Amino acid sequence: MKLRLPGRRTPAAETAPDTAADLTEQLVKAGGKGRPTPKRVEAQGRRPGPPPPPPTTRKEAYARMRQQQAQRRAETRAGMARGQDDYLPARDRGPVRRLVRDLVDTRRNAGSFFLPVAALVLVGYFIPNPAVQNYTVFVWFLFFLVIIVDSVFLGRRIKKTVLQRFPDQPHRMKSLSWYGISRATMIRRWRFPKPEVAVGAEV
C-alpha cells in the first residue's frame, strides 16, 4: 500500500485529460466566443446582395422604371412632409419660410375655419327661408371681417419676428406675410409641409 504524500500528484492525475475544461471550451466555441467579432453589416443582417439582373424584356424594363419612379415620388413626398429643404419647392425653402410656418402653426387662426363656415353658409343659402338666408349673409360678412383683422395681426407678428431673428437679411415682407396668411387659411391637418410645432408653443 502506497502512501499519498500531500502536495504530490499521481501519474494518472498528471496524464488524465481535463474533461471539464474541454467541455467548457467546446461550449464557449459553440456560443460564438473564441472567434473574430463579426462586422457590423453581418451583425445587422444587411449583407449587400448582388445587383439585380438587367431586364430581359421591354415590359420588365418598363415595370422596373415605374417602380423606381414610384419609390422616388414616395421619398419626395415624405421629405416634403418633414419640411426638408432638399425636397421642398422654392417657395417653401429656407429658415425664414420655416419661421413663418412655425408662427402660423403656433396660433389658432380664424382663417383655418374658412371651409367649415363656408359649408354652413352654402347650406343656409339652400334653405327656402328669407330670414335664414339673411342671417347667413350676415354671418358670412362678419366672418370675413374677423379673417381680415386676424390676418392683419398675423402679418404684423410675422414682420416683427422675422426682423428680430434675421435683421441682416433683405426680406420681402409682403410676400412673407401673404405666405403666412395663405397657410393660416388652411385646416391644420391639411397644411403642407406638416406643422412641426404645437399650438401655443414658443417659437
Image: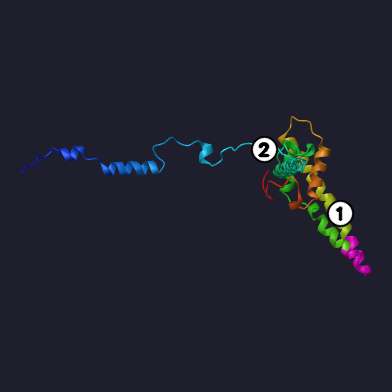
- Near mark 1 (Cα within 10 A), the count class, few <14, some 14-19 or many ≥20, is some
- Which residue is more in the foreground, 165 or 198? 198
- Which residue lies under the disc numbered 2? 53
Does residue 173 belong to the magenta stretch? no
Residue lying at the far left of the rendered structure: 1
Does residue 134 belong to the magenta stretch? yes
In the picture, the disc for residue 69 is none
Q: Which SS class for mark 1?
A: helix
The region drawn magenta spans 123-138
Residue 126 shown left or right of residue 68 in the figure: right
Where does residue 84 sit, x and y in percent of width and height? Answer: 70, 39
Q: Which residue is painted at 83% across and 42% down in the image?
A: 178
Residue 193, by quadrant, is: top right
Q: Which residue is painted at 77% across and 43% down in the image?
A: 59
* Relative to 139, residue 195 above or below: above
Of the image marks 2 and 1, the number of the one nearer the N terminus: 2
- Which residue lies under the disc numbered 1? 144
| Mark nearer the viewer, 2 or 1 | 2
Which quadrant is the N terminus positioned in? top left
Where does residue 195 sit, x and y in percent of width and height? Answer: 71, 47
Where does residue 17 sit, x and y in percent of width and height? Answer: 24, 40
Q: Which residue is painted at 85% across and 56% down in the image?
A: 143
- Which residue is more in the foreground, 64 or 77? 64
Residue 97, by quadrant, is: top right
- Which residue is more in the foreground, 28 or 22? 22
Residue 148 appearing in the image: yes
Which quadrant is the C terminus positioned in? top right
